[in-house]
């Protein structure tokens, strides 16, 4: 039996504004006041896990320990099986441009497209969501959405690798979709449904 969330405040253990905005929108129906790690000036722990679930739990445990609030952490990324599963858990680091040492997803998408070459372009986004309480209890859920990668990139919406990803059964990239449409089918939505059903619905 999963533990129910019955607090009024929650910290999202992320410094990524796009990710925090998406989670805030998904939690809006539950009347939860959402803070980000950046707003609370929490530290960013070393993510040295070998899976999305392990890294999500590292982040949620760190944030709840520092803030005293229940913390929700997301670890997500793009997985391309035909080239060994990259960028995988290194999705954000993979997009760091060596010339600027800054995260640059335009660079990351071009790099990935070059690496793909003639390999199969099937891919999936994975998302692990970890909810951690100050007493050490943790609930973690994983969601996925399968699709393929396209080039050139299309769309200004979303963030990360969204403009090159087309979900199975759709024609638009995640970068072209309206937020509501993407939220209804994304890897994060899949993980969120599991989280909400287990921890938020009575």
Image (cartoon, helix red, strand yellow):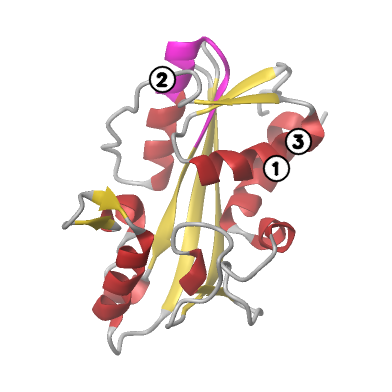
Image spot of residue 23 (x, y percent): 62, 40
Q: Is residue 110 magenta?
A: no
Locate the C terminus by quadrant: top right
> Residue furthest toward the left?
99
Residues at badges 3 and 1 in contact (C-beta under 8 Å)? Answer: yes
What is the secondary structure assignment of the residue under circle 2?
loop
What is the secondary structure assignment of the residue under circle 1?
helix
Query: Dot 2, crowdedness within 10 Å: few (<14), some or many (≥20)?
Result: some
Residue at image position (45%, 21%) is: 63
- The stretch of residues the image draws in magenta is 61-73
* Residue, disc 2: 42
Pick whichever of labels 2 and 1 is earlier in the sequence. 1
Which picture quadrant has residue 29? top right
Q: Compare residues 2 and 42 and report the one nearer the observer.
A: 42
Q: CA distance from mark 2 to mark 1?
A: 22 Å
Residue at image position (48%, 66%) is: 124
What is the secondary structure assignment of the residue under circle 3?
helix
Image spot of residue 46 (x, y percent): 27, 31
Locate the N terminus by quadrant: top right
Asked if residue 46 shows in the view, the reply is yes
Query: Is 38 located above or below residue 190 in the figure?
Result: above
Image spot of residue 156 (x, y percent): 55, 66
Residue at image position (47%, 25%) is: 37
* Residue, disc 1: 26
> Residue furthest toward the bottom?
118
* Residue, disc 3: 28
Pick whichever of labels 3 and 2 is earlier in the sequence. 3
Q: Nearer the viewer, mark 2 or mark 1?
A: 2
Query: Dot 3, crowdedness within 10 Å: few (<14), some or many (≥20)?
Result: few
Q: CA distance from mark 3 to mark 1?
A: 6 Å
Asked if residue 85 shows in the view, the reply is no
């Amino acid at each position: 039996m999963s533990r129910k969330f019955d607090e009024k405040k929650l910290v999202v253990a992320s410094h990524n504004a796009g990710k925090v905005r998406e989670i805030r929108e998904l939690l809006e129906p539950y009347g939860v006041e959402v803070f980000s790690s950046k707003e609370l000036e929490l530290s960013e722990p070393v993510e040295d896990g070998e899976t999305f679930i392990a890294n999500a739990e590292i982040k949620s445990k760190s944030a709840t320990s520092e803030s005293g609030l229940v913390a929700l952490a997301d670890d997500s990324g793009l997985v391309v099986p035909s080239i060994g599963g990259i960028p995988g858990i290194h999705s954000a680091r993979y997009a760091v441009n060596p010339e600027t040492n800054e995260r640059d997803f335009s660079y990351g998408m071009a790099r990935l497209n070059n690496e793909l070459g003639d390999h199969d372009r099937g891919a999936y986004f994975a998302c692990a969501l970890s909810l951690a309480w100050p007493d050490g209890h943790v609930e973690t859920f994983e969601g996925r959405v399968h699709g393929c990668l396209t080039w050139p990139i299309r769309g200004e919406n979303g963030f990360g690798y969204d403009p090159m990803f087309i979900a199975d059964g759709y024609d638009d990239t995640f970068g072209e979709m309206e937020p509501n449409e993407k939220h209804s089918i994304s890897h994060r939505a899949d993980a969120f449904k599991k989280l909400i059903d287990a921890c938020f619905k009575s």
